[in-house]
Image (cartoon, rainbow, N blue to C red):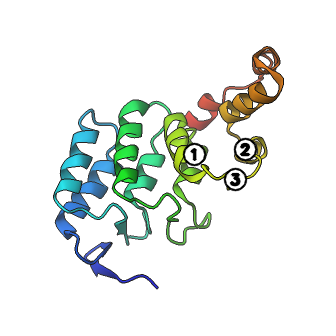
Amino acid sequence: AEARRRIKSIELFEGFSAEASLNLLTACNNHGRSSLFEQVRSALEGKADPNATLTCPVHNGFSPLIFLSKAPPTTHGGEVAKAMRLLLASRADPHRESGRMPFGRWAPLRFAAFMQNVEGMDVLLEHIDSENILGDRFQWAANENVEHIMLREMSKEFGTDLAQQIASRSRYSMLASVLL
């Protein structure tokens, strides 16, 4: 088991600041701000735990990476991706799942796939799939309805012409579905 302490509504590892960790969680939950990267950097410099989690029922076990992974496709993804890279460089665990929720326990990549957070998925895949732990990326992307990764994998295997031909036949917009 992990040696984590609970202070008010957050859990964190020993040696980290509860106040800085709460600031980090808040910054990542408010991911639409242009100052996101600076807020994350500042919190980490203040000894925030990059693996801190909330204990409230609505965001049970949500870590900074989960909050950033939940950024909708309309959010400026470059800033979110930079903040995610900084968290991962600070040893945030990309495999840390949320707490028990009605839909189960999800890791950041699952949230990013659900929200069609393209930049977030790419950053997470760089870190967690370096040893091909997902197995067949195309199959994973098909199961998670991540069209851009399916097309990328299809391009690698069969060339861009076929992938573009298939993409042009799409009958719906995944972005519109997520936003709806």
Residue at 26% in and 78% down: 14
Q: Which residue is mark 1?
A: 125
Q: Is residue 174 left or right of residue 157?
A: left
Q: Which is nearer the eye, 172 or 14?
A: 14
Give the residue type that dot 3 points to.
Leu
Q: Which residue is mark 3?
A: 134
Question: Residue 148: image x %, image y %?
Answer: 66, 30
Which SS class for mark 2? helix
Which SS class for mark 3? loop
Instruction: Tell me if label 3 and label 1 are in contact, CB under 8 Å.
Output: yes
The Cα atoms of the two marked residues, 3 and 1, are separated by 9 Å
The Cα atoms of the two marked residues, 2 and 1, are separated by 10 Å
Q: Which is nearer the eye, 151 or 25?
A: 151
Q: Quadrant of residue 165?
A: top right
Q: Earlier in the sequence, mark 3 or mark 1?
A: 1
Question: Residue 116: image x %, image y %?
Answer: 58, 38
- In the picture, the disc for residue 137 is 2
Instruction: Tell me if label 2 and label 3 are in contact, CB under 8 Å.
Output: yes
Q: Which is nearer the eye, 175 or 3?
A: 3
Q: Is residue 46 left or right of residue 112?
A: left
Give the residue type that dot 1 points to.
Leu
Residue at 34% in and 66% down: 52
Is residue 84 something that shows in the picture? yes
Q: Is residue 51 left or right of residue 47?
A: right
Would you place residue 15 above or below residue 44 in this image?
Answer: below
